Amino acid sequence: MSENGVSSRAKVLTIDTMNPTVKKVEYAVRGPIVQRALELERELSQGMKKPFVEVIKANIGDAHAMGQQPITFFRQVLALCSYPELLNDTTFPEDAKSRARRILQSCGGYSMGSYSASQGIESVRQDVARYIERRDDGVPCDPDDIYLTTGASDGIVTVLKLLVCGEGAARTGVMISIPQYPLYSAALAELSAVQINYYLNEETCWSMDISELQRALDEARRHCNPRALCIINPGNPTGQVQSRQCIEDVIRFAAKERLFLMADEVYQDNVYADSCKFHSFKKVLFDMGPEYSNTVELVSFHSTSKCYMGECGFRGGYMEIINMDDEVKAQLTKLVSVRLCPPVPGQALMDLVVNPPQTGEPSYDKFIKERTATLSALAEKATLTEQVLNTVQGISCNPVQGAMYSFPRITIPEKAIKEATDNGQQPDMFYCMKLLEETGICLVPGSGFGQKDGTYHFRMTILPPKDKLTILLNKVKEFHQKFTQQYS
């Protein structure tokens, strides 16, 4: 009996009785260093003195949180859809009103507050299909192969759920790039799948190497059943853009080894280097002819969260399935039905991304101006980041060809490595935590994404406004020099 006369009993759910796979999940982008950054923000707001006046969170690709401005047309249409009475307001352009009416006519009760079909609003899927056909120079796209999703992440996890099966040596293995975006390792841990690491080549701007894919696959087949190969292009966290030849080689490899391909293409508009161009896996697949286009199973993913949109909070996205078995596709439709539907505002936003203002429409000029300005600013900041970091002895940064991040290699003195190890920390976590405490800059250590043994990195977004990014880079430069001297 307890003191108040009520019987006490053990908790039903404890750390020992909870799902053990959940405890294996790690997500560095919002991990311990970010939690400490939030604590520091609270301490600053309470008047505590720090060596800095604000925390700069450069750990995550949250564009609007870092100051990137929304596209006016997108927000106008979403406002009209959210509050249809505004359709009578003469301050909104007619093309925004016509888009809003079309979206609302596809919603039950003429309201975005209604459920949609589980696969997504049909008219939006039709617009996505037309967008893909334009992007891929006329390669056909069936709207029935489009599934609207809660951001790209939801689609990726859903497809992994379909793939994972077996026990022991028959357990599904999934090949992921190292460095990788932690969604993949987290999802595989939760699903009890086997993570198969293949390493990108840092010396050649984080390129993919087929011989490395073969090495990883051959080793994995000794203890699991490799079934899928994931590619992020443009790369996160590494910012590389894969060449068309590389994509062809990967498709041939997947065909030869009977691997299901997952192409994460959410940064497809974020290409900055003049020598680079985005090539969709689907376009390359179909250009290679029926031998591949009729057989290789491919799912590609896109999102409203990145590119020039940066609308992370709306959780809009889609996936397109190619050559999926019809019975499996029926199971996929069943699986997405369990969650009823993706957020309808996110679906509406996805429709605007794939069907923006066209030439001659009232909003076209402003839309192009805003889109161009955002992408140009990102390109400028990508170059600035590479240039400044490469002036620091002990830091080397590959060109940021695309996406929204740099992933520079840092040299950490042996003395610092020992102190980190003695404290039970990864050396780059030790480095990033000291950087946070001394400068207020929040970066993610490379160990959270994976890296070759004996190398250390951090991921930093290029999203802050140029003036703030310049300050950030100079603070990193000063810190690294001080850190190196301190531990030499």
Image (cartoon, helix red, strand yellow):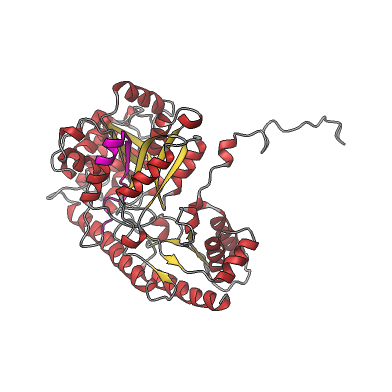
In the image, taking residue 351 as reference, residue 218 lies left or right, namely right
Residue 382 versus residue 307 in the image, above or below: below
Residue 448 visible in rendering: yes
Q: Which residue appears at 21% of the width and 50% of the height?
A: 245
Number of dots carrying numbers: 0
Q: Residue at x 34, y 24 (%)?
A: 328
Instruction: Give the residue drawn at x 86%, y 31%.
Output: 1
Looking at the picture, how far across and down is residue 373, in whole percent? 25, 62
Q: Quadrant of the C terminus?
A: bottom right
Looking at the image, is 112 positioned above or below residue 422? above
Give me the residue at 30% from left, 46% from top.
265
Nearer the observer, 194 or 7:
194
Q: Position of residue 455 (x, y in %)?
A: 46, 62
Q: Quadrant of residue 405?
A: bottom left
Can residue 83 be seen from the camera position used here? no
Pick the front one: 406 or 48: 406
Does the segment drawn in magenta span residue 142? no
Give percent across and percent down for residue 56. 48, 64
| 375 horizontally vs 168: left or right | left
Question: Residue 57: horizontal and vertical position, in percent?
Answer: 48, 61
Would you say residue 264 sits in the magenta stretch? Answer: yes
Residue range of the region highlighted in magenta in the rendering: 252-271
User: Which residue is more in the foreground, 192 or 74?
Assistant: 192
Q: Quadrant of residue 226?
A: top left
